[in-house]
Image (tube, rainbow, N blue to C red):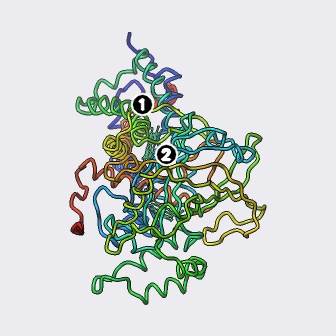
């Protein structure tokens, strides 16, 4: 029978139906598995999209802008390595050399028109482009600790602070319930109680908060955190005039008109056993710290037209010599920043299905 | 030159099954990593990029082998519509297995990312930095991945139909020599 080219009729109709069913079942099994792995059939899994959706639920959609730290300005300059970190990391940026930097100062929150005084936190994101083409990207906040240590808790916090449609403000009972369930936020809350919105980006210390691993040329690993510590310390600057909601950008331009601004990159070296997976806790104050070089910022441009606009400051983009630690916030940041970046660039490209008009109007410019 | 053995050449068969596993794995790795915020996201993306480039190299090799060694003919009594579907889907699969990695590489280039295949191995950009191009390529990477998965499902169903129902030697031309 094998010379018969087709054997459609060799099977009983019953066996043939069985074979069709089997094929359908195999196809369905692959499709279901795909749906599960892709999250469509796993509605309770925390995904980057769900995090970004929650940012949008809390603040609205402002097409083209970042879903968090939406208000900011681009800056550029360079980093001057001094060689001090070379025993710990083989990254080119730490050698005695100059590495060009494109950065962004910002304030947290999803509204690009929020007044600068509305939050006591400022942020600095940097992209170092090494001569070998590798990059180091980092996003730092001017605070010593993060309120939560896991992406699940971060999501719960976003949900708890979603404004109540009736009042336009978060429901205090939900916020209280969140903090009752998250005692790890205590250190952050203690800091936040005393923190005041600064009048300048230039005088702030920007913390990596998450731990990272430095790897030297011999392959030795060292857990680290870092702070960009400002050289400028004058807190009072009279540009901070009452009524200007955008005083930070104005202050920055004015300072840069008088010359570049500098920060020292202070790298804290963990002792063996210091936790690297908990952004809610600092390491003991006696840990050794090294000055790895100087960040020099000499230029600023508005974010709508500046070179930082289209950069995703994903903190897991690292050169050879720096790796992420086991901090669970880092993969979550990478995933969520990518989702935010895809939405804002798709809006820039006017792709079908993207939001084109802000869900909240921009405030009138105040004279 | 025509194929009278009824079989694909050995190198083509080896590449077919190796790449079937790799490409299917890539589809699951891809959708799994973008739907995860855990450490899984990190290690999956570290597999995704080098494996994707490996698939690009294998796909080019495979296309070269395919162009030099004609495929065995489909059964003469196969309805023309099924023949057309078979040929179209095969060229679609070749196209996608080459396009997907190129788009992945191009979209990272357009997004201004360093295209790192390991801690230190960096590929040069193949597209100028441009956010609009990034968005289009990144969305295309998703849409074509879905098309690739659907084409795979149809391809697998058709192969099983030939193997289990028609039993016409089409499936075995990619597996083993049939006993006479
Ligand atoms: C799981 C926790 C976190 C989530 C889900 C999250 C989410 C986001 C998102 C969606 C963006 C916008 C990204 C873009 O469109 O480019 C962003 C920006 C930013 N985040 Fe986070 N974040 C988290 C934790 C942190 C931590 C721990 C820090 C502090 C070190 C931080 C610092 C920043 C900074 C500085 C920016 C602004 C970057 C820029 O100027 O482009 N984030 N975050
Ligand atoms: C056969 C080759 C490939 C296949 C089948 C494939 C498949 C996929 C799939 C299914 C996704 C998820 C799309 C989504 O759900 O939105 C994805 C995402 C992605 N792929 Fe690929 N890919 C391939 C090659 C590559 C290559 C060569 C690169 C880079 C060198 C790459 C980089 C990426 C990146 C960066 C993402 C998105 C990550 C994110 O947005 O968080 N892919 N890929």
Counting from the top left corner in percent of width and height, residue A125 is at: 49, 55
- Camera-side residue of A57 and A322: A322
Image point (23%, 49%), residue name: A350
Pointer 2 chain: A
Counting from the top left corner in percent of width and height, residue A329 is at: 55, 63
Image point (44%, 19%), residue name: B64
Q: Is residue B148 positioned above or below A270 on the image?
A: above
Residue A331 in view of the camera? yes
Pointer 1 chain: B
Dividing the picture into quarters, in which one does residue A53 lie?
bottom left
Indicate if the residue with disc 1 has its beta carbon within 8 Å of ligand 2. Answer: no
Residue at which label 2 appears: A77
Q: Secondary structure at mark 1?
A: loop
- Camera-side residue of B49 and A2: B49
Quadrant showing the C terminus of chain A:
bottom left
Separation of disc 2 and disc 1 at Cα? 26 Å
Residue at which label 1 appears: B126
Q: Is residue B42 positioned above or below B5 on the image?
A: below
Position of A49 compared to A292: left or right? left
């Amino acid at each position: 029978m094998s010379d018969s080219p087709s054997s459609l009729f060799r099977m009983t109709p019953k066996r043939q139906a069985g074979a069709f069913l089997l094929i359908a079942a195999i196809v369905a099994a692959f499709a279901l598995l795909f749906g599960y792995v892709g999250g469509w059939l796993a509605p309770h899994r925390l995904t980057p999209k769900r995090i970004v959706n929650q940012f949008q639920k809390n603040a609205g959609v402002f097409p083209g802008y970042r879903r968090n730290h939406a208000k900011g300005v681009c800056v550029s300059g360079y980093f001057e390595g001094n060689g001090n970190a070379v025993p710990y990391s083989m990254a080119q940026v730490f050698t005695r050399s100059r590495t060009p930097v494109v950065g962004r100062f910002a304030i947290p929150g999803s509204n690009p028109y929020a007044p600068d005084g509305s939050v006591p936190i400022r942020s600095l994101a940097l992209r170092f482009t090494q001569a070998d083409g590798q990059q180091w990207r980092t996003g730092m906040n001017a605070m010593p600790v993060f309120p939560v240590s896991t992406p699940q808790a971060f999501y719960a916090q976003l949900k708890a602070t979603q404004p109540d449609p009736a009042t336009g403000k978060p429901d205090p009972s939900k916020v209280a319930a969140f903090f009752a369930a998250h005692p790890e936020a205590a250190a952050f809350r203690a800091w936040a109680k005393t923190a005041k919105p600064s009048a300048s980006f230039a005088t702030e210390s920007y913390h990596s908060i998450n731990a990272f691993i430095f790897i030297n040329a011999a392959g030795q690993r060292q857990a680290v955190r870092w702070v960009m510590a400002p050289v400028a310390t004058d807190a009072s600057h009279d540009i901070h005039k009452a009524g200007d909601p955008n005083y930070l950008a104005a202050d920055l331009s004015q300072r840069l008109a008088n010359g570049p601004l500098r920060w020292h990159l202070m790298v804290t070296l963990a002792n063996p056993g210091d936790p690297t997976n908990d952004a809610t806790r600092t390491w003991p104050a006696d840990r050794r710290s090294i000055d790895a070089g100087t960040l020099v910022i000499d230029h600023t441009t508005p974010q709508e037209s500046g070179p930082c606009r289209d950069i995703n400051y994903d903190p897991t983009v690292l050169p050879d010599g720096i790796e992420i630690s086991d901090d669970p916030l880092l993969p979550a940041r990478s995933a969520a920043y990518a989702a935010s970046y895809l939405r804002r660039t798709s809006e820039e490209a006017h792709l079908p299905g993207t939001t084109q008009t802000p869900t909240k109007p921009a405030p009138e410019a105040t004279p | 030159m025509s194929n009278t053995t009824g079989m694909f050449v050995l190198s083509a068969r080896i590449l077919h099954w190796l790449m079937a596993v790799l490409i299917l794995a890539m589809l699951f790795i891809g959708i799994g990593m973008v739907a995860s915020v855990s450490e899984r996201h990190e290690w999956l993306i570290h597999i995704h990029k080098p494996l994707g480039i490996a698939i690009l190299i294998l796909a080019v090799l495979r296309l070269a082998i395919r162009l030099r060694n004609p495929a065995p003919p489909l059964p003469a009594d196969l309805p023309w519509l099924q023949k057309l579907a078979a040929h179209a889907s095969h060229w679609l699969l070749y196209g996608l297995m080459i396009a997907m990695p190129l788009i992945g590489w191009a979209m990272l280039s357009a997004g201004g990312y360093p295209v790192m295949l390991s801690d230190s191995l960096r590929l040069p950009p193949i597209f100028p930095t441009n956010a609009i191009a990034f968005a289009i390529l990144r969305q295309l990477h998703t849409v074509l991945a879905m098309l690739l998965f659907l084409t795979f499902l149809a391809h697998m169903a058709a192969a099983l139909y030939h193997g289990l129902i028609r039993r016409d030697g089409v499936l075995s031309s990619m597996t083993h020599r049939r006993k006479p």
